């Protein structure tokens, strides 16, 4: 088979790496890919958002299966475009991608179908939104309705901040049309977890729980990023809670989308807030998480390709993926300035040495290879991922590998997995 992976970050490097191990696969293309990916796949310089050019490529190259990493092409309708041309693609339809593309749609769906989430109101008028904030006079979260590259969410402990957020989103239009509506919701306390599943629209197979680290600095300080590190399993999600998440969130969401005439086939990712053993949905995403994909795919023992094919064919009930019993941890190494304006073109040292370590996988998020040197080429540069028999061992190994890598201005969190360690100590 020939496979095309769409995207060019750490998640896509992990996908290409996993797909490359399948005996079913002869050749992998990736668009646009990155430096690290180019070592195991043929990278084609087409943007993930250029669905017309991607469909042409898949047709001309006789690609048997296209796998979509990021949300943007899904929201733009890549699934429909490929289907129209008779090309097989793993990823949700545009109608299903609304679950991520519109927060008000997701909240209203959850309310209608009894899926646990924070209470909320949707506003199309900034004055009404601000009047509501004033009247409530309590901590809240203000969210731009549409896609805002993870930047459209404001957690506001004071009403004044919430009013500013409304102005930023709706009046100043910091996120363009994504700010036509805002969602204002109750601020939830607790610990976050990421729960992902693969579905063919009927059968829903949950992945082991994972946890992301969104804020840029240790102890969850500083502005939010795309994610500074992740690990799996996440002990905050006990076996019992995992079952309840499947029963009260994942399966109901897939059923609800079918009832709304938006059949859901692909990855369903629930961002959860967990408090007192109960999970509530913060958001849904319609794709693998980045960096959650890195530790999850490292733990997946089964061939991923039959799983992806079964999901596109509606045959998922026959599949039973198996997972490594141990743990894995991914530490993201970023460029100076990230998540704001960041530097590029710094020489990366020590990559080969880190890659030689057993149980270590260095996924590239933003690199390029030029004249015999690896250079930084993105905000998030590397996702250094390690396997271990348990979380403490995986953390130790991941940071040992991180310690071998350096470039000018590099920064990373030193506390990835610490929440899990605290919990294991408390419970153990
Ligand atoms: P979202 O993109 O909706 O997941 O929001 C991004 C981040 O904002 C989440 O990962 C949480 O850290 C935070 N957040 C979102 N909604 C809430 C909420 N209702 N209560 C507390 N924190 C929230
Ligand atoms: N790691 C968060 C995300 O992929 O949205």
Image (cartoon, rainbow, N blue to C red):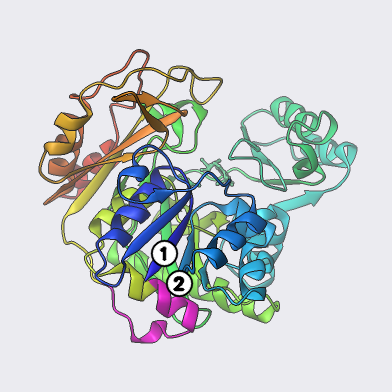
Real-space Cα separation, disc 2 to disc 1, in angstroms: 6 Å
Q: Where's residue 152, x and y in %?
A: 66, 38
Between residues 147 and 157, which one lies in front from this camera angle? 147
Residue that extends furthest to the front in the rendered view of this protein: 60
Between residues 228 and 39, which one lies in front from this camera angle? 39
Q: Main secondary structure of the magenta part?
A: helix
Query: In the shown orientation, is residue 105 left or right of residue 295?
Result: right
**Magenta stretch contains residue 78:** no
Q: Where's residue 411, x and y in %?
A: 36, 21
Question: Would you say the beta carbon of the disc 1 residue lies within 8 angstroms of ligand 2?
Answer: no
Which quadrant of the figure contains the N terminus?
bottom left
Q: Where's residue 378, x and y in %?
A: 46, 29
Q: Which residue is mark 2?
A: 64
Q: Residue at x 56, y 63 (%)?
A: 116
Q: Where's residue 199, x and y in %?
A: 47, 74
Badge 1: residue crowd in 10 Å (few <14, some 14–19, many ≥20): many
* Residues shaded magenta: 308-321
Which structural element holds mark 1?
strand
Q: Residue at x 60, y 77 (%)?
A: 86
Question: Picture quarter containing residue 326?
Answer: bottom left
Which structural element holds mark 2?
loop
Asked whether the residues under the numbered discs 2 and 1 touch, taking CB atoms below 8 Å apart as contact, a structural biologist would say: yes
Between residues 188 and 312, which one lies in front from this camera angle? 312
The answer to whether residue 347 is above or below residue 294 is: above
Q: Which residue is mark 1?
A: 3
């Amino acid at each position: 088979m020939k496979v095309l992976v769409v995207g060019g970050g750490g998640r896509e490097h992990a996908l290409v790496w996993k797909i490359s191990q399948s005996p079913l696969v002869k050749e992998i293309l990736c668009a646009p890919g990155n430096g690290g990916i180019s070592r195991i796949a043929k990278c084609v310089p087409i943007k993930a958002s250029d669905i017309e050019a991607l469909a042409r490529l898949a047709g001309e190259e006789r690609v048997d299966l296209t796998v979509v990493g990021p949300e943007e092409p899904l929201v733009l309708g890549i699934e429909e475009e490929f289907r129209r041309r008779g090309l097989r693609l793993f990823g949700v339809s545009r109608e299903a991608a609304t679950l991520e593309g519109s927060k008000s749609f997701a909240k209203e769906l959850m309310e209608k179908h009894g899926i646990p989430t924070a209470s909320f109101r949707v506003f199309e008028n900034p004055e009404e939104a601000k009047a509501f904030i004033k009247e409530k006079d309590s901590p809240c979260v203000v969210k731009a309705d549409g896609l805002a590259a993870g930047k459209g969410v404001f957690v506001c402990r004071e009403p004044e901040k919430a009013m500013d957020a409304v102005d930023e989103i709706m009046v100043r239009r910091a996120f363009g049309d994504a700010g036509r509506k805002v969602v204002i919701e109750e601020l939830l306390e607790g610990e976050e977890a990421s729960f992902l599943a693969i579905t063919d629209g009927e059968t829903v197979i949950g992945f082991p729980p994972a946890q992301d680290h969104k804020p840029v600095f240790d102890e969850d300080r500083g502005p939010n990023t795309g994610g500074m590190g992740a690990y799996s399993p996440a002990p905050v999600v006990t076996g019992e809670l995992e079952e309840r998440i499947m029963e009260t969130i994942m399966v109901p969401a897939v059923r609800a989308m079918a009832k709304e005439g938006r059949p859901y086939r692909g990855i369903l990712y629930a961002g959860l807030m967990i408090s007192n053993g109960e999970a509530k949905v913060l958001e849904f995403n319609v794709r693998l998480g980045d960096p959650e994909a890195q530790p999850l795919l490292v733990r997946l023992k089964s061939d991923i390709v039959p799983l992806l094919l079964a999901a596109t064919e509606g045959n998922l009930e026959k599949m039973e993926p198996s997972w490594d019993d141990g743990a894995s941890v991914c530490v993201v190494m970023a460029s100076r300035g990230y998540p704001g304006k960041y530097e590029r073109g710094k020489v990366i040292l020590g990559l080969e040495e880190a890659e030689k370590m057993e149980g270590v996988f260095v996924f590239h998020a933003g690199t390029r290879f030029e004249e015999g040197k690896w250079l930084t080429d993105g905000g998030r540069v590397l996702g250094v991922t390690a396997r271990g028999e348990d979380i403490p061992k995986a953390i130790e190994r991941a940071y040992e590998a991180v310690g071998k890598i350096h470039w000018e201005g590099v920064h990373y969190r030193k506390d990835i997995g610490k929440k899990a360690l605290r919990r294991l100590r408390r419970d153990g």
